[in-house]
Image (cartoon, rainbow, N blue to C red):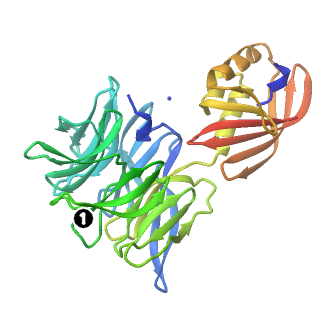
Amino acid sequence: MIMKKLFVLLILPFLGWSQTNTEIHLFDITSENGTLKVVNGKNISNNNGYDSQPHFYNDNIVLFASTRSGQTDIAKYNVRDHQLLYINNTPKGGEYSPQKIPNSKNISAVRLDNDGKQRFYKYDFKTGKDTELIKDLVVAYPMWYNKNTVISSAIVNDSLYMYISDIKKKTNTLVAKNVGRSFHKIPNSTLVSFMKKNGKNWEVWSLNPITKETKQITAIGTSQDICWLPNGNILLPIKNTIYKFNPKKDNDWSIFHQFKNEDINNISRITVNSIANKLAITAEVSPKYLAEEQLKGYNNRDIEAFLKPYAKNVKVYTFPNKLEYEGIDEMRKQYASFFENTPDLHCKVLSRVILGNKVIDEESVTINGNSFKAVAIYEVSNGKISSVYFLR
C-alpha cells in the first residue's frame, strides 16, 4: 500500500514445505480421437492455507496434506461423494506426504513434531492411531515399492540421500546422494524413477531396487515434480502448463495441457490415479488474494495482518527500479507507527490487472484528510509478495 516517500516462516527450507496458500485441483483425463484431454476441473481442498502432496489412495479417494487451525493433518477427499474428511488430528505436529501402504488399508506419512522431531509413521485409516515405521532415518519424501520396501529421500547433514528401507528387517541401504522428491514406479517395468540434482537443475533417473543400478532418463531444468502415464509419458508441470515427454519415443517436450484458470499458478505437485483417468495437482492461488489480504490489513491498520502476505526478504521500490528498503522487519518499522497515527487511512482499488505473477492496482489513497491516486505493482514468488513497485 501507499506510504512510501511520505515517510522517508524444524521444517528445513529445501524440503519445500513452506506454508503458502496452495490448493488441490482434481481433473478428469479423457480421450478424444486418440488424444488425451484434461477436463472438468474442481478445487477439492478449498482451504485458505497449505494443501499439497496429493496421492490417490484408490481411484475414488485422494489423500493430501492440509493445514487447518494452524496444524497440518491428513485429509481425504471422496471423488464419488464430493466429501472431504480428516483422518487424524495431531496437535503437537503435522503430517506430510500421506500415502496408502500396499496390501493394507492404512496410511503412512512423514510427521514433523513441534519439538523438531521428524519421523515416518503408519496411521490407521479409520482411527488415525500412529505407529513409527523407520526409527533410524529422518525421512523427507517416501514411496512404497511393496508392502515391506520403502524408497525415500532422507535428511543427512542438510542434504537429501536416497535409501531403500526394508521395514520387516529394519535395514536402510544408501543408494544415492543429492536427490529430491517425486518417486514413482515406471510403467511396464520393475524400476522406480527419482530426482537427482545436477548443479542448479534436476534430472530424472531410474533405480532398479533389486540391483541398486541407477541410470539417467532425462533433464527437466528447475522443476522438481513429475508423474508417469501408463503409456510411458512423463508429465512435467512448469508454472501453469503441463508438458509431456516419452523417453523411448520423443526427442523433445511438448505441451500436454495449459490451464487458463486464474487460480492455477506455479504447479508444484502432480499425480494420476492407477487407471490414469484422474489427475491431481497442487497449485498456488491467484496472486490477487495476497494483494487483497494485505489491502485488508492496511485498511484495518492491522500490522500483523498487513505483513502476513509478504516475504521475509521483500523489496520495496519506487518505480521503475529505485530500491527504498528491503526486509519484513524494515517494512514493520515503516508501517507500524504510520498505522497507529493515521486513523482515516484508507485505500480503494480503482482498477486491477493480473499478469502472470504480478498484480497491478490503480489506487485511491486517503491519508490525514488528503486523497491522491497511485499505482502499486505486487510481484509474487513462492506464495508470498516478494517485491512491490510504487508509482505516484
> Would residue 302 be seen by someone viewing this image from the given angle?
no
Q: Position of residue 154 (x, y in %)?
A: 28, 41
Question: What is the residue that sits farthest to the bottom in this orientation?
Answer: 33
Residue position marked by numbered label 1 in the rendering? 191
Residue 319 in view of the camera = yes
The N terminus lies in quadrant: top right
**Location of the C terminus (image quadrant):** top right
Q: Measured along the vertical axis of the image, is residue 297 above or below residue 126?
A: above
Residue 225 picture location, percent across and down: 43, 55
* Towards the viewer: 129 or 176: 176
Residue displayed at 91% across by 28% down: 371
Q: How many marks?
A: 1
Query: Quick one: which residue is furthest to the left in this view?
Result: 169
**Circle 1 residues within 10 Å: few <14, some 14–19, many ≥20:** many
Residue at 52% from the left image edge and 39% from the top image edge? 20
Q: Amino acid at mark 1?
A: Leu
Asked whether 328 or 259 is in front, the reply is 328
Kindly indicate the quadrant of the structure image that contains residue 270. Answer: bottom left
Q: Is residue 194 above or below residue 230?
A: above
Is label 1 in a helix, a strand or a loop?
loop
Question: Percent x, y for residue 197?
Answer: 40, 50
Residue drawn at x 45%, y 31% is 69
Residue 280, image quadrant: bottom left
| x, y percent for residue 333 | 69, 16
Residue 282 lies left or right of residue 110; in this view the side is right
90 vs 378, left or right, is left
